[in-house]
Amino acid sequence: MVLEAAAKKTVPFYTESEKAEIAPPSTFIPVATRAWIGRLRVGGFHAGGTDTYGDINGVPKAFHGCVTTIIVGQLVVQALTTHVLPMFGTLPFRPNYKRGAWHKNLLEVWPVFGKVRWPPPLSFTPDGGNSIGGLINRWKIGTDVG
């Protein structure tokens, strides 16, 4: 939400109720949010966001996702919150992302489904097959029109 405010988007992603739910003293994470942590082999700093869209049952842009990636030193955090058109609200769907060894580089920490063991088997690297750039861009799919 902070990155969104800094970017001055014309149409904000997060609703007023989502903003209120996460503001102190409340501590709610927006519904339909997933979060992962990983590690970077070398230290770095990054904070960035990506919008992603996808089809459900052939309907274009049936969901809209907001991805936030934060790197502080060797800690990597990535979160995805999705908004789905009301007509698809109860249908399961899987957002599209680029191929990668995400299950080896990242630990899903939200929602909580039991214990996770730190560190993940692989670390992100500055370049190559496990590059941190690949993680930052993993939700950027389709044709770049901008």
Image (cartoon, rainbow, N blue to C red):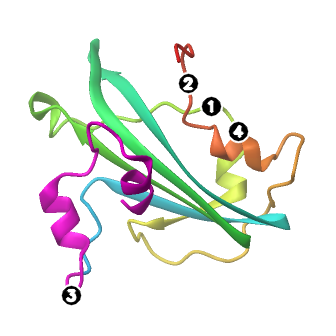
Do the CB atoms of the residues marked 1 and 2 lie less than 8 Å apart? yes
Do the CB atoms of the residues marked 1 and 4 lie less than 8 Å apart? yes
Do the CB atoms of the residues marked 4 and 2 lie less than 8 Å apart? no
Residue named by callout 1: 98
The Cα atoms of the two marked residues, 2 and 3, are separated by: 37 Å
- Which badge, 2 or 3, comes first in the chain's sequence? 3
Q: Identify the residue shown where x is 74% and y is 43%.
A: 133
- Which badge, 4 or 3, comes first in the chain's sequence? 3
Residue named by callout 2: 141
Q: In the structure shown, which secondary structural element does the residue marked by tag 4 occupy?
A: loop
Q: Identify the residue shown where x is 24% and y is 76%.
A: 23
**For the residue marked with disc 4, what is the amino acid?**
Gly
**For the residue marked with disc 2, what is the amino acid?**
Ile
Residue 95 included in the magenta stretch of the image: no
Q: In the structure shown, which secondary structural element does the residue marked by tag 2 occupy?
A: loop
Q: In the structure shown, which secondary structural element does the residue marked by tag 3 occupy?
A: loop
**For the residue marked with disc 3, what is the amino acid?**
Pro
For the residue carrying disc 3, how many other residues have a C-alpha within 10 Å: few (<14), some (14-19), or many (20+)?
A: few
Residue named by callout 4: 100
Nearer the observer: mark 4 or 2; the answer is: 2
Q: Which mark is residue 25?
A: 3
Residue 15 included in the magenta stretch of the image: yes
For the residue carrying disc 4, how many other residues have a C-alpha within 10 Å: few (<14), some (14-19), or many (20+)?
A: some
